[in-house]
Image (tube, rainbow, N blue to C red):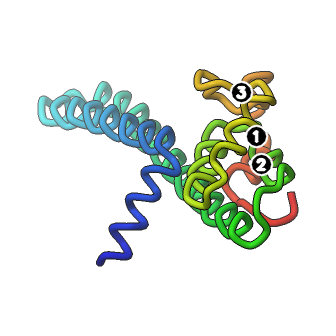
Amino acid sequence: MKQLTLHTFLLCRAAPWPLLLAALCCVLGTLLWAVVVSQHTDGERLSAMLCAFPALGWYGLGGIALLDAVARFIDYQRIRTLLERYGFRERVFRVVASSRCQRDAALLAARQTGHHPQARKFFRDLGYRWYHLLPDKIANNPFQFFNPSFLRQAFLPSRNR
């Protein structure tokens, strides 16, 4: 139980933005679903069905955000292992620099292994600030989100990127 609590705490620290997005999406989906239920009980089947699709969409987006949070936690664990084994290497941080969520996970790993000042300086020298929330690929082309290679990179962290 203690291990589960620690992992939950680290998940919240490693991926705060995806978890916040997942929570907001679930709240919106629940509010829309309440409208669906009330319209269905009033006998308005068509409007209930039309509201059901956006509600399910919000739940789907929340699920995607939750999967992103889990992927960031895996990134955190991988980067922490690399930092413990090899020390600070810019190459490790360059791979995750283009995404705010990955930078957050990397900074948490660096904080826990004593390399936080170096990692923070590295990201700052690359020009990243607190307000750079979107991944670079999405900021340049919003339709890149639907590209299978982007989705594979975002949700399936691997050693050979």
Q: What residue is rendered at 27% in x and 38% in y?
A: 30
The x, y position of residue 139, in whole percent, is 73, 23
Viewer-nearest residue: 49 or 132 = 132
The x, y position of residue 149, in whole percent, is 82, 48
Q: Are marks 3 and 1 in contact (CB under 8 Å)?
A: yes
Image-based side of 45 in relation to 90, left or right: left
Q: Are marks 3 and 2 in contact (CB under 8 Å)?
A: no
Q: Which residue is mark 3?
A: 128
Image-based side of 31 in relation to 56, left or right: left
Residue 46: name its quadrant. Answer: top left
Using a 10 Å C-alpha cutoff, classify the residue at mark 1 as few (fewer than 14 neighbours), some (14 to 19) or many (20 or more). Answer: many
Per the model, the C-alpha gap separating discs 3 and 2 is 12 Å
Q: Are marks 1 and 2 in contact (CB under 8 Å)?
A: yes
Q: Which residue is mark 2?
A: 93
- Amino acid type, residue under disc 1 in the picture: Ala
Per the model, the C-alpha gap separating discs 3 and 1 is 8 Å
Q: Which mark is residue 37?
A: none
The x, y position of residue 68, in whole percent, is 57, 50
Dot 3 or dot 1, earlier in sequence: 1
Instruction: Identify the element where label 1 is drawn.
Output: loop
Using a 10 Å C-alpha cutoff, classify the residue at mark 2 as few (fewer than 14 neighbours), some (14 to 19) or many (20 or more). Answer: many
In this view, 154 is above or below 35: below
Q: What residue is rendered at 37% in x and 34% in y?
A: 24
